[in-house]
Structure formats: structure tokens, C-alpha cells
Image (cartoon, helix red, strand yellow):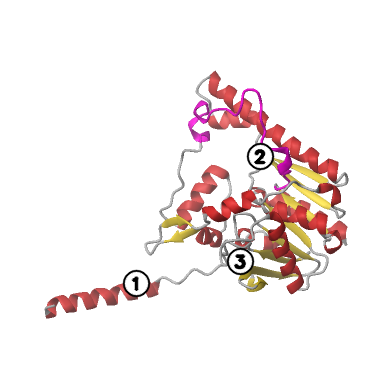
């Protein structure tokens, strides 16, 4: 290597290092403390602690980590001491090859409650977190003060919704409803802006950074939730044993926006597209009604709240509704 080339490479390296130092590392702005709880010999779970006053409130996510609750959790600390648990296989928690059945996931949560000495907590679950709630509420009702289903009260024994005509073919729907558009992966904020535009909500930045590889140039790379973990969670589902739950229950269900609003927003090009939208809307309402009825049969005293126009990430798309209902639920448990 000649002297000129050596000097050029040295200067280039120095400039690159200086530029890197000018970009501060990401710091999660959500005011939580992070700790890890050992739930098995080779498994530690990430636990976020937002602090607060009052009864413990523990958030449980599904394919997301506890950071999914970064935005809403601090707004509940005046009425509860708020925690969040990242299940095994995701984020900073251990990623063992086994332990993903509904029963095992619930036992992981119980180990965390024991380790932190949380007495009579309220558990709030989203997605697969709803399975954790149902198993724990049925098996250990004396350990829980209440259960909150965040669009997660689903009875898998009901099976998929079927009709004589089947589900509408996506090609029948307007383009914006076909699920073909890809998110903008050029940056974390571009990804979140895509969510805001399409869904009216966005995952917290820390959550996006845990779900995707962040390349040196800031673009989003590989999705980090492994297919093996996703498949294991699905294979480990079990029917909801609601009848054994003996604690207060709050269940929020995300309803699609009224069909009239959807027709105005997506503007079907012809009668066939409009009919397909109506058919899909009817199927969605029937599916929700089945799950609501199953819960009511098992837990007659459950408070069931329908939130129109909400997304499945109801605690993000309809934060005010969730805060209102959670606040009232916590207050009546005192």
C-alpha cells in the first residue's frame, strides 16, 4: 500500500468514526426501569417497571414485547404500579426452542409475579396475552384481582368463521383493502408514518427497533420474530375455560368502522367491490359476536365494551377509550 492510499484510508476511517459519534444511540424515552427475571434454568424474561401508586397492573403482549405499552403505561401510574412482561422468544427475553404453549406461557407469567412479589395484580393482555389471562384466571383465581382483555378474548374452540360462500377473495376488494401494500422500511420513522397513515396508530419506536433489524444506514431489515416462535404459539393455543374464572373481567373488543364510513373512505369502483366490503364487514361482526357470547356465557358478570373503528392494537388506536375503561375498572376494585 502506497503512502497516499494509506493516508486517504486513515482519513476516511477517522471521518466515519466521527460521524458515528455524532449520532447518539437510541434511548427509549418511556420512563421505565428494566430488569430480568429468571423463570427457568435457561430462560430470563425482560420486565419493564414504569412505577406508580396502587395495585400492580401487568401488561402482557403477544408477538410484541413489553415496549408496545411504552406510550400508554406512564399514563396509568397515578392509579396503579405498572409493569410489562416480554414473553420468551421475543425482544430481550431468552429465546429457547421450547416452552411456548398457553400453559407454559402462563406459568412464565406466574414465575414473574412470584419473583416480584406482586400481590393480587390486574393482568391486561393483548393478542396471545389473552391466552395467558384465561389460563391464569381459570387456574389461579385467588392470585388475581382482575383481568383485562385488550381485543384478545378469543375462544379457539370455536374454530374459524365459515359460511357457505366462504371469505371474500381479496381481489374483489378495493386496492387499499387487499393487504398488498408494503410498509416503508427506509427508516424507523418512515415505518411508523406508514402505520399512522394506514392504521391511524403507530407502534412505539422502541418496539419497532426490537421487531426489526436496524441496519447501519438506518433502514429496516429482517423481521426478528422467528417463524418457529410464531408457529409454536399458535400450536400451543388451548380452548378458553372461562367458566372457571372467578375474578372481575373487563373485555374490550375492536369493532371495524361502520360500513358507511368504510365505503366513503375506500370508494369501491363498482357494485361487486361494495358487496365484497359488506360481506367482509358482516363476517367480522359475526366473529366478534361469537367471541363476546362465549365470554359472557362463561363469565356472566364480565364488562364487555365494543370500540367502533378500533384496530386490534386497541391500546394504541383508541388510547383514550382504553384509559377511561381501565381507570374505571381499577377504581372499582379498590
Tell me where residue 92 appears, x and y as whole percent: 56, 67
- Quadrant placement of the N terminus: bottom left
Establish if 78 lies above or below 156.
Answer: below
Which residue, given by chain and number where applicable, does mark 3 sit on? 30
Q: Is residue 227 above or below residue 163?
A: below
* Residue 208 pos. (x, y %): 52, 58
Secondary structure, magenta segment, majority class: loop
Q: Residue at x 43, y 56 (%)?
A: 220
Q: Which mark is residue 282?
A: none
Task: Identify the residue position indicated by label 2 in the image.
Answer: 309
Task: Check residue 161 for magenta coloring.
Answer: yes
Q: Secondary structure at mark 3?
A: loop
Quarter of the image for residue 125 reads bottom right
Mark earlier in primary sequence (2, 3): 3
Q: CA distance from mark 1 to mark 3?
A: 27 Å
Residue under pointer 1: 19
| Image height of 172 relative to 239, above or below | above
The C terminus lies in which quarter of the figure? bottom right
| 156 drawn magenta | yes
221 vs 13, nearest the viewer: 221
User: How far separated are the C-alphas under marks 2 and 3?
Assistant: 27 Å
Please indicate whether residue 221 sits to the left or right of residue 91 in the image. left
- Rendered residue at 52%/58% (across/down): 211
Amino acid at each position: 500500500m502506497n503512502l497516499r492510499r494509506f493516508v486517504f484510508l486513515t482519513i476516511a476511517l477517522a471521518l466515519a468514526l466521527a460521524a458515528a459519534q455524532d449520532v447518539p444511540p437510541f434511548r427509549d424515552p418511556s420512563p421505565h426501569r428494566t430488569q430480568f427475571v429468571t423463570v427457568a434454568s435457561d430462560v430470563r424474561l425482560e420486565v419493564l417497571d414504569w412505577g406508580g401508586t396502587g395495585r400492580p397492573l401487568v401488561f402482557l403482549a403477544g408477538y410484541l414485547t413489553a415496549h408496545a405499552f411504552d406510550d400508554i403505561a406512564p399514563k396509568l401510574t397515578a392509579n396503579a404500579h405498572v409493569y410489562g412482561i416480554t414473553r420468551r422468544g421475543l425482544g430481550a427475553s431468552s429465546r429457547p426452542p421450547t416452552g411456548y404453549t398457553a400453559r407454559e406461557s402462563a406459568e412464565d407469567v406466574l414465575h414473574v409475579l412470584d419473583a416480584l412479589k406482586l400481590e393480587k395484580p390486574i393482568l391486561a393482555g393483548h393478542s396471545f396475552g389473552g391466552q395467558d389471562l384465561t389460563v391464569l384466571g381459570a387456574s389461579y383465581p385467588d392470585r388475581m384481582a382482575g383481568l383485562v382483555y385488550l381485543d384478545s378474548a378469543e375462544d379457539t374452540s370455536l374454530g374459524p368463521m365459515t359460511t357457505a360462500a366462504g371469505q371474500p377473495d381479496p381481489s374483489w376488494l378495493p386496492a387499499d383493502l387487499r393487504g398488498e401494500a408494503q410498509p416503508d422500511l427506509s427508516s424507523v420513522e418512515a415505518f411508523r408514518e406508514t402505520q399512522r397513515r394506514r392504521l391511524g396508530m403507530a407502534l412505539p419506536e422502541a418496539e419497532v427497533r426490537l421487531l426489526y433489524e436496524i441496519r447501519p444506514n438506518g433502514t429496516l431489515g429482517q423481521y426478528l420474530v422467528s417463524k418457529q416462535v410464531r408457529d409454536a404459539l399458535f400450536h400451543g393455543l388451548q380452548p378458553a375455560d372461562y367458566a372457571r374464572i372467578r375474578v372481575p373481567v373487563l373485555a374490550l373488543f375492536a369493532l371495524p368502522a361502520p360500513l358507511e364510513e368504510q365505503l366513503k373512505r375506500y370508494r369501491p369502483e363498482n357494485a361487486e367491490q361494495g358487496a365484497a366490503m359488506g360481506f367482509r364487514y358482516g363476517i367480522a361482526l359475526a366473529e366478534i359476536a361469537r367471541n363476546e357470547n362465549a365470554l359472557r356465557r362463561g363469565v356472566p358478570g364480565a364488562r364487555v365494551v365494543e370500540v367502533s373503528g378500533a384496530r386490534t392494537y386497541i391500546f394504541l388506536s383508541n388510547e383514550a377509550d382504553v384509559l377511561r375503561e381501565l381507570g374505571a375498572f381499577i377504581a372499582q376494585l379498590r
